[in-house]
Amino acid sequence: MTMLTLDASPVLSFEYRTPVVKRSGLHRLFAAAVVNSQFRETLLCEPESALENGYLGQTFSLTDQETAIVKTVRGKDLTDFAQKVNQALKTV
């Protein structure tokens, strides 16, 4: 019979911590668009309305630059929209 042995050594917990990603308004905006088709369509067709009304009573904390980009970018679907927003953010 073969026996598997593991050499376990104590590891400090901070070695395995992953950096906490700061959740921005954009992350929340795209999360809402992913989970709700009605909000997604509003975001794609009427972004001003999507930003103004928010999602489930929650608004999105966006910078002025993020707001301007979301309002002006147009995409054929959410993937296209997200890519264009990302590209626009890289230029500011």
Image (cartoon, rainbow, N blue to C red):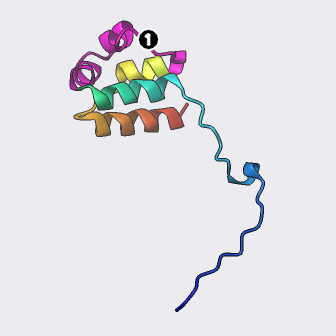
Q: Pinpoint residue 34: horizontal percent, then vertical percent.
A: 31, 32
Q: Is residue 37 left or right of residue 9?
A: left
Residue 11 horizontal side relative to residue 66, left or right: right
Relative image position of residue 59 (x, y in whole percent): 43, 11
The quadrant in which residue 39 appears is top left
Residue that sits furthest to the front in the current view: 1
Q: Nearer the viewer, residue 27 or 57?
A: 57
Q: Residue at x 45, y 17 (%)?
A: 67
- For disc 1, the marked residue is 59
Q: Residue at x 78, y 61 (%)?
A: 10
Closer-to-camera residue (3/13): 3
Q: Quadrant of the C terminus?
A: top right
| Kind of residue at disc 1 | Thr
In x, y percent, where is residue 52?
37, 7
Above or below, 38 relative to 92: above
Q: Is residue 28 left or right of residue 64?
A: left
User: Magenta residues?
Assistant: 37-65
